[in-house]
């Protein structure tokens, strides 16, 4: 299935600034509000369903024998038509 990027933003930010953005997403999820992403003149609003799939990924990119780039990715995913079973693998997630 081809992927269409609806919005993308990438910028260096402090840990506190990132925490504030993630907190805003968490607040919107908890309050069952839509999430609007804005950067410059671009924006997109998405309204996750009650039970989206939540994917967390830790990655290292680069050569095996030298320093690379580390990342933590958080992703909410759902079918536009409301279908899908929302099942994931690996057991319950814990973040410490």
Image (cartoon, rainbow, N blue to C red):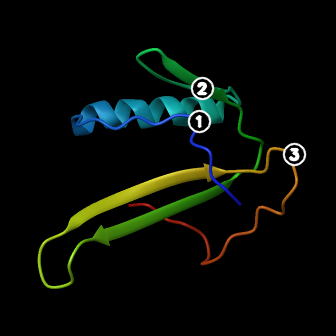
Q: Are marks 1 and 2 in contact (CB under 8 Å)?
A: yes
Measured as percent of width and height from the top left, residue 88 is found at 68, 70
The quarter holding residue 26 reads: top right
| Residue depicted at 49% across the width and 65% down the height | 94
Q: Residue furthest front?
A: 2
Q: Quadrant of the C terminus?
A: bottom left
Q: Which mark is residue 44?
A: 2
Q: Name the one closer to the observer, 77 or 94.
A: 77
Q: Tell which circle, 1 or 2, labels the residue nearer the N-terminal end.
A: 1
Closer to the camera: disc 3 or disc 1?
1
Of helix, strand and loop, which one carries label 3? loop
**Residue topped by disc 3:** 81
Label 1 residue SS: loop
Q: Residue 76, position in %: x, y?
A: 61, 49
How crowded pointer 2 is (Cα within 10 Å; few <14, some 14-19, many 20+) is rated as few
Q: Residue 49 shows which numbered tag? A: none
Say if mark 3 contacts mark 2, CB within 8 Å.
Answer: no
Q: Relative to 57, say whether 91 is above or below.
A: below
Find disc 1 in the rendering and name its residue.
6
Tell me the CA gap for discs 3 and 1: 17 Å
Of tags 1 and 2, which is closer to the observer? 1
């Amino acid at each position: 299935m081809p992927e269409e990027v609806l919005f993308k933003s990438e910028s260096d930010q402090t840990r506190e600034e990132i925490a504030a953005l993630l907190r805003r997403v968490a607040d919107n999820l908890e309050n069952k509000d839509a999430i609007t992403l804005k950067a410059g003149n671009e924006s997109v609003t998405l309204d996750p369903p009650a039970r989206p799939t939540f994917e967390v990924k830790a990655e290292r990119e680069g050569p095996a024998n030298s320093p690379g780039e580390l990342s933590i990715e958080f992703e909410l995913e759902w079918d536009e038509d409301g279908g899908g079973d929302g099942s994931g693998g690996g057991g319950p997630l814990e973040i410490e």
